[in-house]
Structure formats: C-alpha cells, structure tokens
Amino acid sequence: MRTASAPDSAPLGIEFLPCIVGFLLSSNPVLATFNAFELQETLVINLSFEQTHIIGNTETDLENIMHNTKSSESTADLESDEQSPSASLCPFHLAISVHDLPSSRKFYGELFGCKEGRSDTTWVDFDFFGHQLVCHVDTAQKAEDGISNPVDGHDVPVPHFGIVLDLDRWKLLADQLTQHKVEFVIEPYIRFKGQPGEQGTMFLKDPSGNALEFKGFRDLNRLFAK
C-alpha cells in the first residue's frame, strides 16, 4: 500500500497512470466498456481525494470505483428504469355488498391494515393496496357458496377479487394470515410450477362471504406471460 501526505500539485502516482490504464484495459473485462481517457480521469479523481486508497488492487475495488463515479444523472435514469410496473397503473374502484360495517372494518381495516377513507351509515371505503374498495351494506344479502371453477386441481370460487404482489410480500402476507388463524378456501401454495404463469396463490373469504385471492410473482412483468 502506498501512502503520502496531501500533494503539492499533482496527486501521488499520476506519472504511472498511462501504464496503469493500459494494463487495466487489456486485463480486466469489467472495464472494457470504458475508454482510456474515461478510466484515467476516474483514477485521477480517486488519487486526488483518496491518497491512501489502493488503486487497482482487486477487480472488486475497480468495479466499485467505476460505479461510485457514475454521474447522478445516469443513476436517476437507472432508478427510473427500475420502477415497478405497477407505478403506472391507475387505482381500481370496486364496490361489494357486505352484511354489516363493523365486521368489514375488522376484516379489511384491522386484519389487512387497510386505511379507512370516507364513510356513511351504509357504506365505507378502504385503501385496498392503493385501490378503492367500497363496502355497501346489503341486509338482504345471503351467505351463498356461489360457483367454482377448477384451476390447477383446485375449485376456485367465482366471483373473487384480490391483489397481485411480488413473491416476497406474498409470502409475508401468507405467514401473517396463517398466524392469525385465518380460514383459507385454498391454502397458500405455488401454482403452475415450472410454467410461464408460475405464481403463489391463496383464497379466503371476508365475513360476508366475498372471496379474495392474493397472488405472488417473482417477476411482476410476467403477470400475463403465456
């Protein structure tokens, strides 16, 4: 390791930069996308501000140097490109009938932690994962099983609604619901294994018999893959 006090003019090691640059470009594929001028300018920056830094000691150090000296503009572009596909979706509005508001508030508000919005004596709306879910009281509503369709060997209740999450959040939600001893219509499992539509899924019903499905994908961009 080579150290020195702050330089009077040029940073320490500046005279060796042409040789260092030539060696790095010929021996390190990580730096192949940089031309000699860019790499030399980067090393000058690091020599100027970090005299005690090990220059070119390992490939990892070099990769870190190149990443750390990228412009803030390119970083912003990267962050923009990596935004979740859901960022461009419009909030969805869904109105469902329920037996009463207290049980709906307990289920959607307490169990799922949905923030309550506007309400009246016969309805209340919830922020359901960024979407507007409105529960309307229908005292004549009867608890019916409805119909079901076979999907991947399970009888899926119809109609149903729900949300699509990334797989990690889906697993966390499944664990939380299991800990709360929620009764599932279809317990959490991975459906369509090894196929383009592979996904986590689970079904349950609210106190009024409305069926919900929660899906989980490793890659949300594969939601409509076939």
Image (cartoon, rainbow, N blue to C red):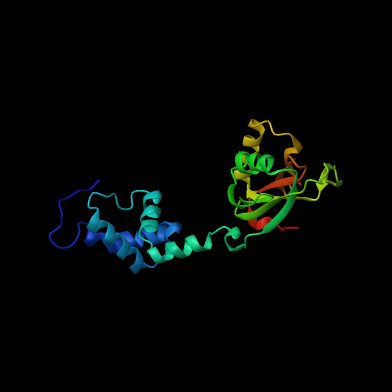
Quarter of the rendering occupied by the C terminus: bottom right
210 relative position to 218: left or right: right
101 relative position to 84: left or right: right
Quarter of the rendering occupied by the N terminus: top left
Count of marks overlaid on the render = 0
Residue shown at 43%/65% (left/top)? 74
Q: Residue furthest front?
A: 121
Residue shown at 27%/50% (left/top)? 53
Residue 152 is at least partly visible in this image: no
Who is closer to the viewer here, 46 or 186?
186
Residue shown at 73%/34% (left/top)? 183
Residue shown at 57%/60% (left/top)? 87
Task: Report which quarter residue 175 is drawn in.
Answer: top right
Instruction: Give percent across and percent down for residue 117.
Output: 58, 52
Instruction: Give percent across and percent down for residue 91.
Output: 62, 60
On screen, residue 95 above or below 167? below
On screen, residue 173 above or below 33? above
Task: Report which quarter residue 100 is drawn in.
Answer: top right
Who is closer to the viewer here, 189 or 212?
212
153 relative position to 178: left or right: right
Residue 27 is at least partly visible in this image: yes
Who is closer to the viewer here, 192 or 83?
83
Instruction: Give percent across and percent down for residue 188.
Output: 71, 38
Instruction: Give percent across and percent down for residue 114.
Output: 60, 46
